[in-house]
Image (cartoon, rainbow, N blue to C red):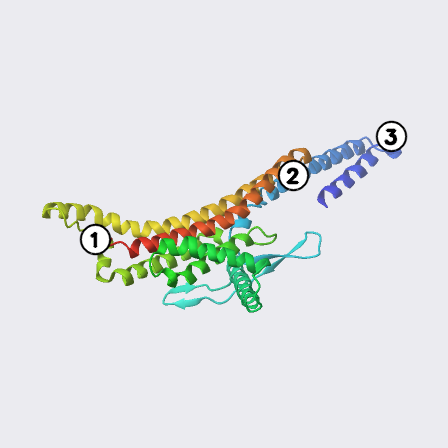
């Protein structure tokens, strides 16, 4: 609006400066004053254009398509039949719960909603597959379709990943590890759906998964080893002289204790980094289109982004598999530590 007003004033001033009244008998001061006014308006117009350009550049710098997608927030983007194709829905904000002097905010966020949705989808798919399997078994038919795919995946994870790595009497760990596998798988896949978000790209989510795995691993070791569990912390070689035992214990005990925490830390960082890196690559490639503003240059980033998205489907499955495999391996290692 300001630039349009300035253009109009400049146009009116130019008309006055070239009008017949000025040429046929107006005082000499009027053209000078008119020219000064026109010059002032022109300068104001140029200044307005520069301010508009600076504002546009500032707005462009504020636009960030990468961090809002991979970071948590209190907003959800929902598909909507409008010009932008989506609508922002603000999640409710609850009053914080006071624990002593600390305020604990339990308000839902985007990643919390995605975790709930991933759990809901996992329950629907797995319970539905189990009922379909029972129905097919009663009818004397083999499972097919989605039920057959889920059954094959469950049997592979159970027989080839969990039981061989956990060791004897590992059946009790199958429900937990299968739940971890399918939760991470659905959470990873939701990040590839339009308007979705990857909850496992949040380090708080992966840290909590790692903490739960740490508790399960240590409790499994305590139950399997009993009093011998202390040997997983304090290293005491029985076939060495006393001075050698003391020396090795003082060196290896901190290493053993540190190793208990590096395992869940590695689980946390591996899942977080792998799920974040893929989305950053896709969004960075798409941003090249807007940076250059050329259709020809945009063809290559789109092709590479599509290739990475296809790779992300494999990575979503792979990371769920690796997390489950490592947790099963850590449980098996601590249960047989005395051997």
In-front residue for pair 287/328: 328
Question: Mark 2 or mark 3, which has the lower sequence index?
Answer: 3
Question: Mark 2 or mark 1, which has the lower sequence index?
Answer: 2
Q: Looking at the picture, how far across and down is residue 160, in whole percent?
A: 42, 53
Q: Looking at the picture, how far across and down is residue 109, in whole percent?
A: 52, 59
In-front residue for pair 134/92: 134
**Residue at position x 22%, y 57% from top?**
230
Question: Quick check: 285 left or right of 23?
Answer: left
Is 179 situated above or below 12?
below
Q: Looking at the picture, how far across and down is residue 149, in whole percent?
A: 55, 56
Q: Are marks 1 and 3 in contact (CB under 8 Å)?
A: no
Instruction: Give the foreground label among 2 and 1.
Output: 1
Instruction: Give the foreground label among 2 and 3.
Output: 2
Is 44 situated above or below 276?
above
Look at mark 1 in the image and give the residue it sits on. Answer: 234
Is 39 situated above or below 269?
above
Q: Residues within 10 Å of mark 1 (few under 14, many from 20)?
A: some
Q: Residue furthest left?
A: 242
Question: Mark 1 or mark 3, which has the lower sequence index?
Answer: 3
Occupied quadrant, residue 148 = bottom right
**Residue at position x 29%, y 59% from top?**
221
Is 207 situated above or below 307?
below
C-alpha span from label 1 to label 3 = 105 Å
Look at mark 2 in the image and give the residue it sits on. Answer: 53
Look at mark 3 in the image and give the residue it sits on. Answer: 23
C-alpha span from label 2 to label 3 = 38 Å
Occupied quadrant, residue 5 = top right
Q: Looking at the picture, how far across and down is residue 147, in whole percent?
A: 56, 60
Label 3, secondary structure: give it: helix
C-alpha span from label 2 to label 1 = 67 Å
**Does residue 234 appear in this view?**
yes
């Amino acid at each position: 609006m300001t630039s349009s007003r300035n253009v109009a004033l400049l146009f009116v001033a130019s008309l006055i400066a070239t009008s017949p009244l000025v040429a046929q008998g107006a005082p000499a001061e009027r053209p000078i004053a008119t020219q000064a006014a026109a010059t002032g308006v022109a300068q104001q117009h140029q200044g307005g254009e520069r301010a508009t350009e600076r504002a546009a550049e500032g707005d462009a710098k504020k636009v960030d398509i990468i961090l809002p997608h991979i970071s948590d927030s209190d907003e959800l983007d929902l598909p909507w039949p409008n010009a932008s194709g989506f609508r922002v829905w603000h999640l409710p904000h609850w009053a914080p719960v006071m624990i002593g002097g600390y305020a604990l905010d339990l308000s839902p966020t985007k990643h919390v909603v995605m975790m709930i949705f991933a759990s809901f989808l996992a329950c629907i798919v797995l319970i539905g597959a189990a009922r379909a399997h029972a129905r097919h078994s009663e009818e004397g038919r083999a499972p097919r379709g989605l039920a057959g795919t889920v059954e094959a995946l469950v049997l592979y994870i159970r027989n080839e990943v969990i039981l061989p790595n956990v060791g004897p009497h590992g059946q009790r760990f199958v429900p937990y590890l299968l739940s971890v596998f399918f939760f991470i798988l659905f959470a990873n896949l939701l990040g590839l759906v339009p308007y979705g978000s990857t909850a496992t790209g949040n380090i708080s989510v992966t840290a909590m998964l790692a903490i739960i795995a740490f508790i399960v691993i240590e409790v499994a070791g305590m139950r399997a080893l009993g009093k011998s569990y202390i040997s997983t912390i304090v290293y005491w070689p029985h076939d060495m002289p006393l001075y050698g035992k003391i020396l090795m214990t003082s060196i290896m005990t901190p290493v053993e204790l540190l190793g208990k925490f590096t395992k869940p830390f590695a689980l946390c960082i591996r899942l977080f980094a792998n799920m974040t890196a893929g989305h950053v690559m896709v969004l960075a490639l798409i941003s090249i289109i807007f940076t250059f503003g050329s259709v020809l240059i945009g063809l290559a980033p789109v092709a590479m982004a599509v290739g990475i998205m296809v790779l992300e489907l494999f990575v979503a499955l792979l990371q769920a598999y690796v997390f489950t495999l490592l947790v099963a391996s850590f449980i098996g290692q601590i249960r047989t530590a005395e051997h």
